[in-house]
Amino acid sequence: MTVSLSLSDLTIRFGGHVAVDAVSATFRPGELTVIVGPNGAGKTTCFNLVSGQLKPTSGQVMLDGRDISNWSPAARARAGIGRAFQLTSLFPDLSVLENVRLAVQAREGQGASLWRRARALTALRDEALQHLADVRLTDMAQLPVSALPHGDQRKLEVALLAAMRPRVFMFDEPTAGMSVDEAPAILDLIARIKGDPDRIVLLVEHKMDVVRALADRIIVLHNGALVADGPPDEVMALPVVREIYLGADAAAPEAMA
Amino acid sequence: MSMVSETATAAAGRNTRSAGWWIVALAIGGILFALAFAPFLFDNVRSQQVAARICIFIVLVASYDLLIGYTGIVSFAHTMFFGLGAYGAAIALRGMGPGWDAVAVGTLAGVGAAALLAILIGLLSLRVKAIFFAMVTLAAASVMLVLASQLSGLTGGEDGITYRAPDLFKPATKLWLDADGKVATLWGVKLNGKLAAYYFVVLSCALLFAVILRVVASPLGTVLEAIRENEMRAEAIGYRVVAYRTGVFCLAAVLAALAGSVWAVWLKYTGPDTALSFAIMIDILLMVVIGGMGTVWGAVLGVTLMSLAQFYLKDLMEVAAHATGDLPLLPELLDPDRWLLWLGILFILLVYFFPKGLVGTLAGKERRA
Ligand SMILES: Nc1ncnc2c1ncn2[C@@H]1O[C@H](COP(=O)(O)OP(=O)(O)O)[C@@H](O)[C@H]1O
Ligand SMILES: [Mg+2]
């Protein structure tokens, strides 16, 4: 079944502060949408609303035509929404391999099983190892996550998402905190996922070369509101976008130019 | 640079067993051997009593470790579930007479009540903050304690209930006859009902402990650890955290209740002090901390050390006080009446030198995948 995801008038307020303000958008399978905006624009909060860590004050998240706004994060994950976190969120005392295996296991519905045959467990494990190879973490498989350098933890964050094999991939600044030679493996992985015509990919990313290489579409958030949405060239040329970046973020204009 | 070498040593450490691991393995092996053959190794009644209590508490503490060590759930109601199993068996044995049917009915009732109560407490309060959950379990356990003392018609109140165990466990029962028609002996031990009762305890506890080991080694065990480590991410990759928490809380309650009913059959007496009091809950907490949370095997060490201290520290101090009788101050300090003080000091030293418990500190944690 092809996947469809749409947000309608999605809004969340924290006290008096409107962090996401009436955002509406429809995402199509096979399309990679990059979400940009200055720090505090509401990108991560928007992701939290889609993957269920936060519930909207008003508005809806629709998946395959169903309103999932009040579903738990677990229910959304099982329905095919996968999320990697900007602030690395792993299982620090477990091994790298166990971390990924947990995601594979959840997808396969094997969470509660006590009596898995050894062969079936091996299958889970082998798949987990494959996901580790994809992000170049094979050598670290047996280490506890807490022993990993930050860059490797960022890679593992992405491996967990890949292991969920979701229909909607959400990456929140996946290469932030990675060194220049680490990032390409992750970007390759995202490019490969983007090639699948049945997946929706949402990507929060600042680096303009990455945005150019991957984006089919760009959405700009500013103060929680959606201020631009369209093909990369058009969005980048909009006066309002240039204004936001010139006004709010001094470093960005050169990157955008 | 240092990162690389650290990583390399850590990787190497995973393939070779450390000295600490061997010490722990030998100690646990020795304890299990002693428990398995206690009637043949120690001939007095008291040591068998201690051995049986150790067996029961290993199950009780290991099942509690599923909650506190594996899943990160703090509960003060574990003795309550233990007590439900014990009182279930005790009330049935008194009411129906000393038969296996009574044991079965009582155990089923106790375990059923424990499971039901666990689901109720779990669903009502496992979705809220951990501290609130701990409070609810504390309240439930207090209510149960009051109920047990108020409903004295059913529970015998503060005095508890005395009853007989099934005939198989009577000391007069002959399991095996020799040529003269008398009870046969093996290595000098009479093959009588007392022996049968001890092995009933050992085998039941071995079975329950095996179930716990199975749980932590299974895919489910890893999910429980994941919930402890990072509840939010466990939920985000698709695990219904509340359902798992409630499930493991219920499982631990059932295991504790089963241990309780075995305990009741062995003791032939059930009262607040043996099956329900908060003193037992504190023992469980101390034992799990000494052994090491999240290790399961730690239960074997924690329970044994603590039980030996509880039963024999007084005797040992008596001897020590006598031996140092001529010296100043020492006999005073070693007076058997001060045994609790020394138990406290022992505990503080253990926690200081083995912050992750004996097994956690010495053997580390074996990571599988
Ligand atoms: N749980 C929360 N409680 C209160 N304010 C929040 C919360 N989460 C986010 N915010 C606020 O919402 C705004 C958007 O934050 P965020 O979505 O993290 O921005 P971005 O990811 O675009 O940098 C910020 O002003 C932030 O302080
Ligand atoms: Mg953010």
Image (tube, coloured by chain):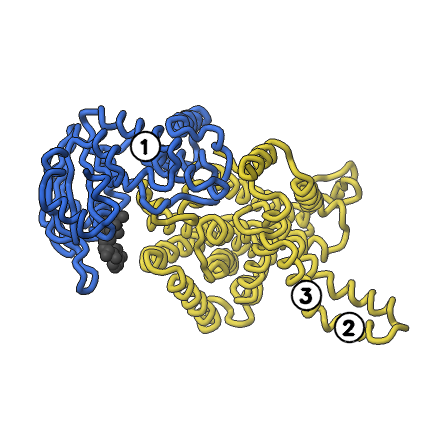
What color is chain B drawn in?
yellow
User: Dot 1: what SS?
Assistant: helix
Image spot of residue A249 (x, y percent) = 23, 50
Image quadrant in which you'd find residue A238: top left
Image spot of residue B253 (x, y percent) = 45, 53
| Residue at the (86%, 75%) spot, across then down | B328
**Alpha carbon distance from label 1 to label 3:** 51 Å
The amino acid on which the numbered mark 1 sits, given as a three-letter code, is: Ala
User: Dot 3: what SS?
Assistant: helix
| Residue that numbered label 2 is attached to | B333
The vertical placement of B178 against B61, above or below, is above
The verdict on a common chain for dots 1 and 2 is no
User: Viewer-proximal residue, A52 or A177?
Assistant: A177
| Residue that numbered label 3 is attached to | B345
What color is chain A drawn in?
blue
Q: Are marks 3 and 2 in contact (CB under 8 Å)?
A: no
User: Viewer-proximal residue, A119 or B149?
Assistant: A119
- Residue B88 can be seen in this image: no
Q: Are marks 1 and 2 in contact (CB under 8 Å)?
A: no
- Near mark 1 (Cα within 10 A), the count class, few <14, some 14-19 or many ≥20, is many
The amino acid on which the numbered mark 2 sits, given as a three-letter code, is: Leu
The amino acid on which the numbered mark 3 sits, given as a three-letter code, is: Ile
| Residue that numbered label 1 is attached to | A162
- Residue A178 can be seen in this image: yes
**Alpha carbon distance from label 1 to label 2:** 64 Å
Image spot of residue A140 (x, y percent) = 48, 33
Asked if residue B178 lies left or right of residue A153, the reply is right
**Alpha carbon distance from label 3 to label 2:** 13 Å
Asked if residue B128 lies left or right of residue A199, the reply is right
User: Viewer-proximal residue, A229 or A161?
Assistant: A229
